[in-house]
Amino acid sequence: MDKARSDRSSDADRRQDRRARVQHGATIDFVDQPVVIDCVVADLSQGGARLETEHAEHVPKSFDVIVNDSNEVYPAKRIWHGDGEVGVTFLTPEKD
């Protein structure tokens, strides 16, 4: 397990936005490589999300999350990963 993942309870205290439980099919697009991984957006807030995927250990530091139903694209940065999950923050011009 990734150390950052084991400290997840403290992450909740640092979140600026409350996360809602959702179940949206999505893909993780590696952007600079022709690689896409299926995932599920399990928790979502304005600033980030928790993704569920069988390939959490292969998710790069930066990537796009593409929500299947809406085709919305969210540039994201991996904050933690482990146990089939990836925690991300959405990148905005201020966070790049």
Image (spheres, grey):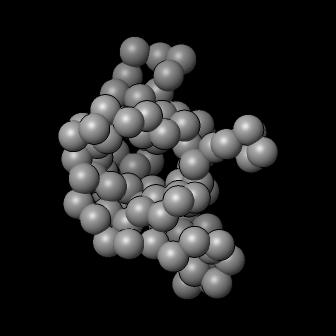
- Does residue 86 lie above or below 22 as drawn? above
Q: Residue furthest right?
A: 94
In this rendering, would 38 be left or right of 4?
Answer: left
Residue at 68% in and 77% down: 14
- Does residue 84 lie above or below 90 as drawn? below
Q: Work out which quarter of the rendered image holds the C terminus and state it.
A: top right
Residue 45: where, in percent of width, then height? Answer: 48, 64
Query: Disc count in the image?
Result: 0
Q: Nearer the viewer, residue 61 or 49?
A: 49
Residue 48: where, in percent of width, then height? Answer: 53, 58
Inspect this view and state whether residue 82 appears: no
In this rendering, would 39 be left or right of 2?
Answer: left
Question: Which quarter of the picture shows residue 36?
Answer: top left
In this rendering, would 37 be left or right of 1?
Answer: left
Residue at 74% in and 46% down: 95
- Does residue 74 lie above or below 5 as drawn? above
Question: Which quarter of the picture shows residue 7?
Answer: bottom right
- Does residue 86 lie above or below 4 as drawn? above
Residue 87: where, in percent of width, then height? Answer: 50, 59
Residue at 62% in and 74% down: 15
Q: Nearer the viewer, residue 16 or 38?
A: 16
Residue at 24% in and 53% down: 24
Inspect this view and state whether residue 40 appears: yes
Residue 90: where, in percent of width, then height? Answer: 57, 49
In this rendering, would 52 be left or right of 76?
Answer: left
